[in-house]
Amino acid sequence: LKYYFRYVARLPEETVSASLVFGAAMHRAIEHHFRQLLSGAPAPSFADLFDVYQTRWHEPTGGEVRYAATESRQSLNAAAERLLKAFQTSRVAQPGGTILGVEEDLCGQIEPGAPMLRGIVDLIVETPDQLVLTDWKTSRARWSEYQVEDAAEQLLLYAELARDFAPRKPVHIELVILTKTKVAAIDRHPLPVDDRRLARTRRLVGRVWRAIQAEHFYPAPSPLTCGGCPFREPCRQWPD
Ligand code: SF4
């Protein structure tokens, strides 16, 4: 139903979760770091990264920013400072290999009959023996192995879209979770590229596409997704 409100009915979004803006701002700062490395420049300073982070907060968000009960702009800024400093000294900030792409926009046919799928890969690095695709996420708490497992499908599809970058090399995928706890944590989660699971994910894409075409939209309430959903009111009213 959220998909329907956003992409079919195109309802205006009255609120935006502060966590989403924070995630986008952190993403922008890390992207800046890797773009500098890609261009052959030295890694940017903390002040540069924090500037990029702050700039994202000044851009229009499309709705009123809604903070969780325990959050404020100041507390998020403090978390960003801790995370960016931890990131700069972590091994993930200096990938071993050649950076081939940062926020690389890929597109391809994943499943016959479904539209082309577009994926934006945060970081693509080539090492002597593999192609490494990394996706960055920010989170309030450290991810469990089940959360990591559930997020694997997105990266499996990216792996499929990115094969042409190094056709003779195996693709390695990994998630890096930046956790904005009091002690910043940067956790790297390598994921297996499993052909059986990829085939299942492709079929899932086909099924989701057929459900969209059949207008098979319904609420799927969950404490994880409804809290930050900008369509809570239209959802309550649905199907009026
Ligand atoms: S409030 Fe929950 S169930 Fe309703 S559209 Fe949003 S995410 Fe879906």
Image: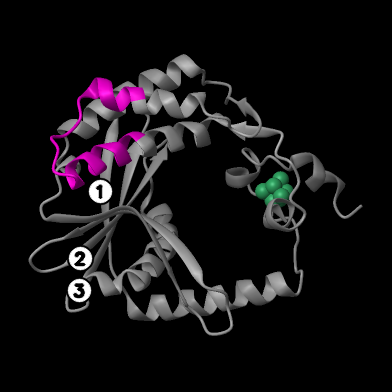
Name which residue lies at 44% across and 17% down.
75
As drawn, the label of residue 79 is none
Q: Amino acid at mark 3?
A: Pro
- Write the start and end of the magenta stretch as one range: 29-51
Tell me: 24 left or right of 93.
right
Task: Indicate which disc, 2 or 3, sits on the residue closer to the N terminus.
Answer: 2
Q: Nearer the viewer, residue 161 or 74?
A: 161
Position of residue 33 relative to residue 200, above or below, is: above
User: Which residue position is annotated with label 1?
Assistant: 188
Q: Are marks 2 and 3 in contact (CB under 8 Å)?
A: yes
Q: Nearer the viewer, residue 195 or 25?
A: 25
Q: Amino acid at mark 1?
A: Arg
Give residue 104's position: percent from left, percent from top: 35, 56
Mark 1 C-beta to ligand 1 under 8 Å: no
Q: Is residue 30 magenta?
A: yes
Q: Is residue 89 magenta?
A: no
Residue 199 appears in which quarter of the rendering? bottom left
User: Which residue position is annotated with label 3?
Assistant: 170
Residue 68 appears in which quarter of the rendering? top right
Tell me: 228 left or right of 46.
right
User: Which residue position is annotated with label 2?
Assistant: 131
Name which residue lies at 66% across and 31% down.
63
Dot 3, crowdedness within 10 Å: few (<14), some or many (≥20)?
some
